[in-house]
Image (cartoon, rainbow, N blue to C red):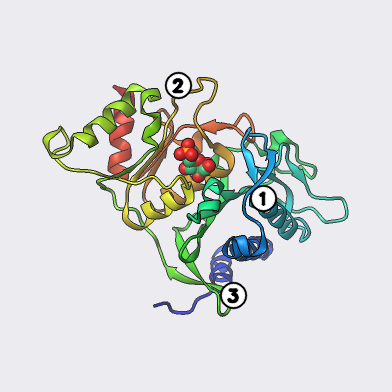
């Protein structure tokens, strides 16, 4: 059951807590929410409106784009470019940053986003999501460059995701805890259903793509091996495993019941520091996880303290239940 608080009302009540808030940020968030509603409808209709399948194009990541990757990227940009809250955007699906077109006013925020994370799942009807991260545009900058986006995750003012699953949910943090909203399609509103989400400190459930096992570094090999030994091994407990190949779905499960998610650096492609992207996957998810009492780390440093060197930079990701992540971090130190 819910007490009927919509995300719009929640954001406005949050804004009242911020001295000197002008409503600019609240209006930006509402534009983001509108984009997620449009994407939820497109994802839900799927084959009925011919949006599934590949677009036969590649993005900057060298990944084959799904039609919905391109469509949802357009939706996010069109929904957020006109209102005068943003100075520029960065997207997984855009090679370079997206400056706000000259015909629109520019604002004081920057937004990085992955319009459809986990899109390899879309054709097989498995949950996918949208991830976004909002930072302040550096003081005095009205025409931000790619370099102006290179702000550590600790300076994010908002992070969130939409999860297009059995329910469509929106999970948000503005630095005051994590709150979850469920889309009521009958009224077209996200309703507060999961106030103050927190991650249990302990877990017996890990998430990793084990097909990469032979490429992992020693600390991850050791950690997973101990989990697989179960009760007879050094952990003295049996573990469960989940791998959805949709980061949004994994993070949401962890926010709901705990867990540890890993996409570690592997030497399958030594030129890559990991698979997941810092600016629009790892950083926003790290803000959410930390605000929910979890830990988010590369194994060597706190993800939100990584100094970005490019908008498409990749990092190793280990996040989730505090005590499990800290155990794996300790293995990296030994
Ligand atoms: P793999 C989706 O493409 C993604 O970026 C994350 O959402 C997900 O956790 C990961 O990649 C899945 O990677 O190698 O298992 O397909």
Q: Earlier in the sequence, mark 2 or mark 1?
A: 1
Residue occupying image coordinates x 69% and y 62%:
24
**Distance of label 2 from label 1 (alpha carbons):** 31 Å
The picture quadrant where one finds residue 298 is top left
**Dot 1, crowdedness within 10 Å: few (<14), some or many (≥20)?**
some
Residue occupying image coordinates x 39% and y 32%:
211
Residue 190: x, y in percent? 54, 70
Give the residue number, with chain letter if any, for mark 2: 267
Image height of 168 relative to 257, above or below? below
Mark in front: 2 vs 1: 1
**Dot 2, crowdedness within 10 Å: few (<14), some or many (≥20)?**
some
Pick the front one: 12 or 273? 273
Give the residue number, with chain letter if any, for mark 3: 188
Q: Is residue 186 visible?
A: yes
Give the residue number, with chain letter if any, for mark 1: 67
Residue occupying image coordinates x 50% and y 56%:
125
Q: Earlier in the sequence, mark 3 or mark 1?
A: 1
**Distance of label 2 from label 3 (alpha carbons):** 46 Å
């Amino acid at each position: 059951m819910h007490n009927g608080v919509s995300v719009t009302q929640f954001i406005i009540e949050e804004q009242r807590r911020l001295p000197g808030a002008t409503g600019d940020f609240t209006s930006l968030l509402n534009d983001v929410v509108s984009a997620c509603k449009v994407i939820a409808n497109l994802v839900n209709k799927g084959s009925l409106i011919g949006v599934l399948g590949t677009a036969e194009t590649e993005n900057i990541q060298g990944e084959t784009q799904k039609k919905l990757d391109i469509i949802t990227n357009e939706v996010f940009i069109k929904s957020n470019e006109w209102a005068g809250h943003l100075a520029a955007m960065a997207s997984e699906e855009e090679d370079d940053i997206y400056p706000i077109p000259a015909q629109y006013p520019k604002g004081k925020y920057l937004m990085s986003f992955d319009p459809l994370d986990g899109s390899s799942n879309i054709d097989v009807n498995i949950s996918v999501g949208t991830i976004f991260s909002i930072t302040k545009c550096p003081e005095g900058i009205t025409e931000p460059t790619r370099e102006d986006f290179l702000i550590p995750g600790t300076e994010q003012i908002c992070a969130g995701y939409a999860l297009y699953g059995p329910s469509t949910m929106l999970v948000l943090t503005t630095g005051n805890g994590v709150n979850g909203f469920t889309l009521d399609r009958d009224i077209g509103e996200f309703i507060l259903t999961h106030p103050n989400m927190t991650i249990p400190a302990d877990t017996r459930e890990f998430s990793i793509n084990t097909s990469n096992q032979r490429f992992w570094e020693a600390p991850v090999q050791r950690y997973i091996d101990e989990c697989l030994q179960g009760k007879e091994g050094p952990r003295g407990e049996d573990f469960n495993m989940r791998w959805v190949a949709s980061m949004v779905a994994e993070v949401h499960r962890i926010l709901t019941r705990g867990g540890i998610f890993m996409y570690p650096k592997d030497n399958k492609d030594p030129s890559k520091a990991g698979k997941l992207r810092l600016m629009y996957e790892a950083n926003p998810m790290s803000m959410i996880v930390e605000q929910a009492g979890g830990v988010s780390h590369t194994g060597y440093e706190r993800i939100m303290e990584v100094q970005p060197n490019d908008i498409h930079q990749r990092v190793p990701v280990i996040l989730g239940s505090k005590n499990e992540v800290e155990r794996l971090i300790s293995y990296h130190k030994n």
